[in-house]
Amino acid sequence: MLYFENIHKTFNKNTVNEKMVINDLSLHLKKGEFVTVIGGNGAGKSTMLNLIAGVYPPDRGRIILDGESMTNLPEYKRAKHLGRVFQDPMMGTAANMEIQENLAMAYRRGKHRGLRWGITKEEKILYVDKLKNLNLGLEDRMSSKVGLLSGGQRQALTLLMATLSQPKILLLDEHTAALDPKTADRVMDLTQKIVTSNNLTTLMITHNMKQAIMYGNRLIMMYEGKIIFDVKGEEKSKLQVADLLQKFESISRGGFANDRMILS
Amino acid sequence: MEILLSIYGAAAQGLTWTIFALGVYITFRILKYSDLTCEGSFALGGAVSAVFVVKLGGNPYLSLILALISGMVAGMITGFLHTKLKIAAILSGILTMSGLYSINLRIMGQPNTSLVANNTMVSLIKDKLPSAAELGIRDSVIQTSIIMVLGLVFSLIAVAFLYWFFGTEIGSCIRATGNNDAMVRAQGVNTDWTKIMGLSISNGFIALSGALVTQTQGYADVGMGRGAIVIGLASIVIGEVIFLKAKNFALKMLGVLVGSVIYRIIVALVLRLGFDTSDMRLLTAIVVAIALSIPIIKKKNPFVRKEGHR
């Protein structure tokens, strides 16, 4: 469903800080695939996600979703197909607005917005129902400001917002990295639940190799703007952390020894 | 008696400036955009209103609509400069403000326009009322009372409109843009557009206020908007201090209304203490600077930190 073809992206072109981040990258996602993405710092993982989301355009290459070219579509126009959760819990929600107002914004993703009232009674019932599924007690705090929530609660809410109107692709950019281990596990469980129950095509960046192996049905490893390892199905389920480490070592010739990937 | 009359007059003046403060509130507090266009669009509203009445013989009330539209266009220009041409927020406002100075001079053909010999919003109402002598009160009291009622009616309409507008789907998107524009784009909204919209409504209101002030004070001046943003900010800050606990949006806006009135009363009282009018800008600027820095001062207070706050 998603074709990411021969994409190139260089930041700060023609300056001393020129950095090629994505180098002739191609990726094809099938419907219902849950892909985990790993790779060291600067491997181009986040850039790949941002290119899909349209935060910036690629220098070369094509991005096609369900037969529709998205290559030069601005971010806000692509948003109707995409659900996104960012690494920073502050990024996905509007802190000074109520929980229900945030949900109402997400509910209208891809729909026409006019001068109707921003939130209806029927919606509120739906939101209470959806918030109950999170098991965080947020259903009783619908009119609390999101800024009062903890990081974990905010990520759970962002996840709910990203999937409220079924996206074609769910993009998760290390969405548990800023949380404490216990909260991270909870948010990850929730992610799994939401992805499976909606059969969502998902692209999840993680720096946690265990997580990358445990979740999803396909794993890709990136290095210097390219995909250097791509496994799925049974082969993926047999993977061990040691295998991945070895793979890294062989490709980067030991360059990963100091990388934070080793810590997981 | 004299002091009561001057407070009465100040309160009426504050009400005509409320819509201006609400306009500044939209950009400064909702969009989190320091928009200096307001200094030009305020005078633009005044100029449009005065010229429409004096040179074209138009209805003073109709002139408000023209002022509103002219202000909205000015806001759109600032929005265009900022979002499409990527000029820094504050500079976009300064450019429009600066350009408007020449435009306002062109509109009036002179630095100021007097409405003395013409119908104004106030005189139209006054003609329908019995004369001051019949009522047995001073002429200026009638004048001030009319201004007060006009200011109050227009301010309340403005508050009601903004309460409705910022509750709608589009209004919610504008509010969220000031909060976190990356999130708004991720929800499929063009944030360039929401910013332009917010600036346009803000400056429309500001020009409307400029027209209202012109109609009630009897003249438009090309410099009438100079330093106005500080007055708007002072009104907002005073309102926030008084309505400290207000969570409801309508209450917050009523706070701006009250703030605008109180600001004018404070000015009137300070002037009575013997300060010169020309010192007021400095005093206002100092008050606003202190009020805006309170959050930072609180944070750096070592005693507060010891209690475990960050």
Image (tube, coloured by chain):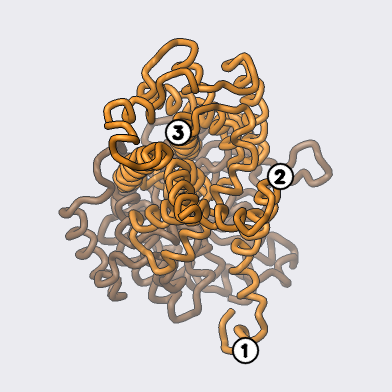
Chain colours: A brown, B orange
**Residue B88 visible in rendering:** yes
> Would residue B305 be found to the left or right of residue A115 on screen?
right
Q: Which chain's residue wears label 1?
A: B
Q: Mark 2 falls on what kind of element?
A: strand
Instruction: Calculate the distance from the C-alpha at mark 3 to the C-alpha at mark 2.
Output: 63 Å
Which three-letter amino acid code belongs to the residue tagged 2?
Met
Residue B239 position within the rendered picture, expressed as x and y whole percent measured from the top left: 46, 59
Which three-letter amino acid code belongs to the residue tagged 3?
Thr
Judge depth for marks 3 and 1 and give the one in front.
3
Q: Could you tell me which quadrant the C terminus of chain A lies in?
A: bottom right
Q: Mark 1 falls on what kind of element?
A: helix
- Foreground residue, A37 or B198? B198
Instruction: Calculate the distance from the C-alpha at mark 3 to the C-alpha at mark 1.
Output: 53 Å
* Marks 3 and 2 share the same chain: no
Q: Which chain's residue wears label 2?
A: A
* The label number, if any, that marks residue A20 in the structure image: 2
Residue A37 position within the rendered picture, expressed as x and y whole percent measured from the top left: 52, 58
> Would residue B225 be found to the left or right of residue B184 on screen?
right
Instruction: Name which residue lies at 16% across and 53% down.
Output: A122
Judge depth for marks 1 and 2 and give the one in front.
1
Residue A80 position within the rendered picture, expressed as x and y whole percent measured from the top left: 36, 41
* The label number, if any, that marks residue B216 in the structure image: 3
In this rendering, the answer to whether B176 lies above or below B240 is above
> Would residue B141 be found to the left or right of residue B94 on screen?
left
In this rendering, the answer to whether B86 lies above or below A174 is above
Instruction: Name which residue lies at 44% across and 67% down.
Output: B244
Q: Which chain's residue wears label 3?
A: B
- Residue tagged by mark 1? B306
Which three-letter amino acid code belongs to the residue tagged 1?
Lys
In this rendering, the answer to whether A97 lies above or below B102 is below
Instruction: Calculate the distance from the C-alpha at mark 1 to the C-alpha at mark 2.
Output: 48 Å
